[in-house]
Image (cartoon, rainbow, N blue to C red):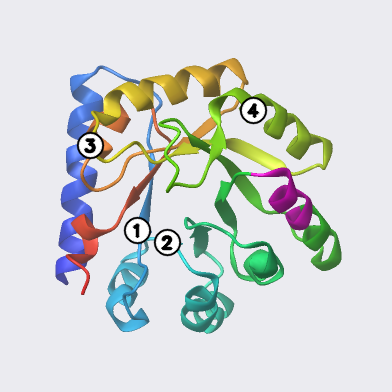
Amino acid sequence: MHQTVQNLIQIKDKIKEEINKNNVENYEPNIIAVSKTFKIEHISHLINFGHSHFGENKVQEALEKWSDMKKNNKNIKLHMLGKLQSNKVKFAVKIFDYIHSVDSKKIAQKIADEESKVDKKIKIFIQVNLGNEIQKSGINIDYTKELVDFCKSKRLEVLGLMCLPPFDEDPEYHFKELKKINDSLKLKEISMGMSNDYVKAIKYYSTFLRIGSSIFGTRD
């Protein structure tokens, strides 16, 4: 059994352990294996094992790596996790099934326009910049509802909110805050938690965990 598969199994066991510890019922988060920078040969062990959710940060890399693989494996669900530039939206809509980084009306409108051209529905998350960090993407917390409403008016399929907590702060505070906003907007899914903090995200019922290095190892 390949090391990546062993790592995934261990993570699933850890998630079950945490869920049981918290006495939670009817909750099973999706694991997005963040495969950015890794070649398809390295990822294929997980695909053969039956894992279906994978995440990439760059549109061009995703097109090069996944176009053929997705044609041959209809179960694969590809998630765009990085910042999406407006000139890349038409390519993103073709290759991705989920976009986690919608943070402006401009990007939302572009996605809606491209969806109508190719007759495809993308599942989206609104990225919220909870820490108001200048270097990070994401909508300001005060304008989140306005952007969600705009997306819905364009008939986009908004699943929920996404966040990247400030690196030097306890992520649990931000997970709790995002969950509260997500619930107030009556959104059913939520994208939060990565390799270093997914256990804490489970406490707040994150439905999509974005796990990379704990599965694939450190990147070059």
Which region of the structure is painted magenta? 104-111
Mark 1 vs 3, N-terminal side: 1
Find the residue positioned furthest to the front: 134
Mark 4 vs 3, N-terminal side: 4
Left or right: 47 with respect to 168? Answer: right
CB atoms at circles 4 and 1 under 8 Å apart? no
Q: Secondary structure at mark 4?
A: helix
> For residue 143, which numbered disc appears in the image?
4
Is the residue marked by circle 4 packed among few (<14), some (14-19), or many (20+) residues within 10 Å? few
CB atoms at circles 2 and 4 under 8 Å apart? no
As rendered, which of 7 and 133 lies closer to the eye?
133
Which residue position holds label 1?
A: 33
Is the residue marked by circle 3 packed among few (<14), some (14-19), or many (20+) residues within 10 Å? few
Of labels 4 and 1, the one closer to you: 4
Name the residue at 14% across, 68% down: 3
Of labels 1 and 3, the one closer to you: 3
Q: Amino acid at mark 3?
A: Asp
Which residue position holds label 2?
A: 54
As rendered, which of 38 and 29 lies closer to the eye?
38
Name the residue at 17% across, 65% down: 217
